Image (tube, coloured by chain):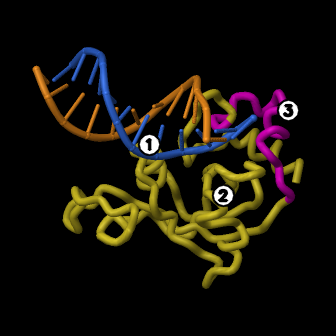
Chain colours: A yellow, B orange, C blue
Amino acid sequence: MRYWLMKSEPSDVSIDDLAKRDNKTIAWYGVRNYQARNFMRDQMKVGDQVFFYHSSCKQPGIVGIAEVSKLAYPDATQFDPDSKYFDPKATAENPRWFNVDVRFVNKTRLIDIKELRSYPELKSMRILQKGNRLSITPIDPMEWEYISRLM
DNA sequence: GCCAACGTTGGC
DNA sequence: GCCAACGTTGGC
């Protein structure tokens, strides 16, 4: 079982939105970065634990825990001409983008990026590195443990 | 709203 | 295959 951090803009899908969905589950659609796609497609397994992170908002930070509830499958939005995630180069025979399903586990207090930066134990976290833009990053078990204790 | 950093695109 | 130009991300 592995650990991940997944960013979502709360104006798009917040932790509360996730908690309110049917089965508290959502397809992690819209990822259009190959590295992040590969994490979902090639490495994520059902039961993997996820820090749910709010980005591009007033208070960026970890706000809850979720888990992978379905293995990766083709992202439906790539085939939808009306979606902003439509990809004309993707076909049903040759899908380019994949997503897993993620299920709500629980909310936590907000552990914002400033607080995360304040712990030397977490300084190697990918999201704290300068210029980091990757929306899905692996979390080291030690880091998961450390952050869990803060909650 | 700014802008540094990054990934992607496409001409050569 | 290089790399300049461009678009996007995301904290501030």
The answer to whether the residue labelled 2 contacts the one labelled 1, judged by CB atoms less than 8 Å apart, is: no
Give me the residue at 22% from left, 60% from top: A94
Give me the residue at 81% from left, 30% from top: A121
| Left or right: A79, with A23 as reference point | left
Q: Position of residue A116 (x, y in %)?
A: 80, 39
Judged by depth in the image, the label closer to the viewer, 3 or 1, is: 3
Q: Which contiguous range is marked in magenta? A: A109-127
The answer for which chain carries disc 3 is A
Furthest residue toward right = A150
Q: Which numbered circle lies on residue A35?
A: 1
Give me the residue at 56% from left, 69% from top: A69
Circle 1 crowding by C-alpha within 10 Å: few under 14, some 14–19, many from 20:
some
Whether A126 is among the magenta residues is: yes
Element at badge 1? helix
A111 vs A140, nearest the viewer: A111
The disc, 3 or 2, on the residue closer to the chain's N-terminal end is 2
CA separation in Å, label 2 and label 1:
19 Å
Element at badge 3? helix
Q: Position of residue A30 (x, y in %)?
A: 45, 60
Provide the residue designation for mark 3: A118
Q: Quadrant of the C terminus of chain A?
A: bottom right
Give me the residue at 65% from left, 50% from top: A56
Q: Is residue A6 above or below residue B10?
A: below
